[in-house]
Image: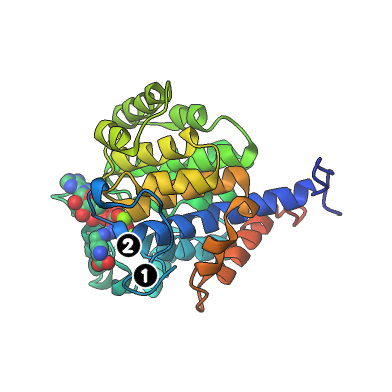
Amino acid sequence: MLPRMHQNLDGSTALESVADRASGALLGTFVGDALGMPFEGVLHTLIPEHVEMVEARRGRGTYTDDTQMMIALAESLISQGRVDAEHLAQAFLDAFDADRGYGSGTRRVFGLWRSGVPVADAAGRVFDSRGSRGNGAAMRIAPIAVRFRDDPERLVVEAAASARVTHRHAVGVDGAVVQAAAIGAALRGEDILETARSAAGTAELACALDAVGRLLNRERTPAEVSARLGSSADACESVAAALYSAVANDCFEAAVPFAVRLGGDTDTVAAMAGAVTGAREGRRAIPARWLEALEDSHRGRTHVHSLAARLCDVGTSRNNTCR
Ligand code: F2R
Ligand code: MG
Ligand code: MG
């Protein structure tokens, strides 16, 4: 069957437009990660007003665990067509590179898997068996949103399943669900905050997203926003901060630097803001100087772009096209 194509006003087709948004979601994560990484853990007062790709520990434009785990999740999804916890855990272990900077809880989960603890059990053994409420499951979630963009109910189920592999605390899982729902809404051209708020399954995330809504009543500085929402590695704080950055700013070039300027977990808040705004505006809206700066190693920007295209195909396996 031939792909369904509709001509847009700018001459592009609907087919191109979805592929471009899918690529925007994955490369937006990568760009946010690379822009924010040099400032991770830095107080917001020490971050320059004009954020650009600067020299970093592994070089300018390099990625951290956020993008590394997103790539592993995308590869596993393409291979299995859905979240397969065992396969995903192995993909995370195969991709692991300590030098990319992982969360302590996630490293402990990996260690438990390596020592023979079943995949289904390990995530429930960290943080005094409360499980992690870190943002590690939310930061990597863009491939789930692309793959299940046309089925919002399935998107939520698969996002939660992918999160539980490493994060068992309700807030860690809910952060991933909310972030996936927001990216899905952006891909479909729907209201991002409203969709995210409807997807929230914990009172904590729901309250944080209500606070985001209230902050949108006037222009805010990054200092004000980080004081109200927080920007730590906690999923509740950082997902809300990323969504504020995406919704309060009308273009990728403004939203992602705004997220970095919140301080705290800068690579991750910017990666999540980048995923949402990249999905909303497409890869074509990401400044070329940032895309060109991204590392293009074996699993670099070319690979990430091709993963997005393949996720589109897997997502429409009925006719093998990207709607
Ligand atoms: N880990 C980092 N950055 C520090 C190292 C960077 C350094 N510059 C380097 O390059 O080496 N960044 C990455 O970690 C965050 C994602 O974390 P994830 O995967 O969720 O891990 P974790 O450890 O499970 O959770 C993060 C922190 O949240 C707190 N926390 C989580 N659950 C908790 C609970 N139940 N009770 C209390 N605290 C909990 C802990 O402080 C965790 O360490 C991203 O920023 C990524 O970029
Ligand atoms: Mg990171
Ligand atoms: Mg981080």
Q: Nearer the viewer, residue 306 or 319?
A: 306
Looking at the image, is 288 positioned above or below residue 15?
A: below
Q: Is residue 195 left or right of residue 117?
A: right
Q: Percent x, y for residue 102? A: 28, 63
Outermost residue toward the front? Answer: 49
Read off the residue under disc 2. 38
- Name the kind of residue labelled 1 in the image: Glu
Label located before the other in sequence (1 or 2): 2
Q: Percent x, y for residue 171? A: 30, 39
Outermost residue toward the left? Answer: 128
- Name the kind of residue labelled 2 in the image: Pro
Q: Percent x, y for residue 245? A: 43, 39
Q: Percent x, y for residue 88? A: 43, 63
* Residue at 74%, 53% in the rendered image: 16
Report helix, strand or loop for mark 2.
Answer: helix
Point out which mark residue 55 bears. 1
Q: Which of 93 and 297 is in front in this view?
A: 297
* Residue at 62%, 66% in the rendered image: 306
* Residue at 44%, 55% in the rendered image: 32
Q: Nearer the viewer, residue 227 or 210?
A: 227
Marks 1 and 2 close (CB-CB < 8 Å): yes
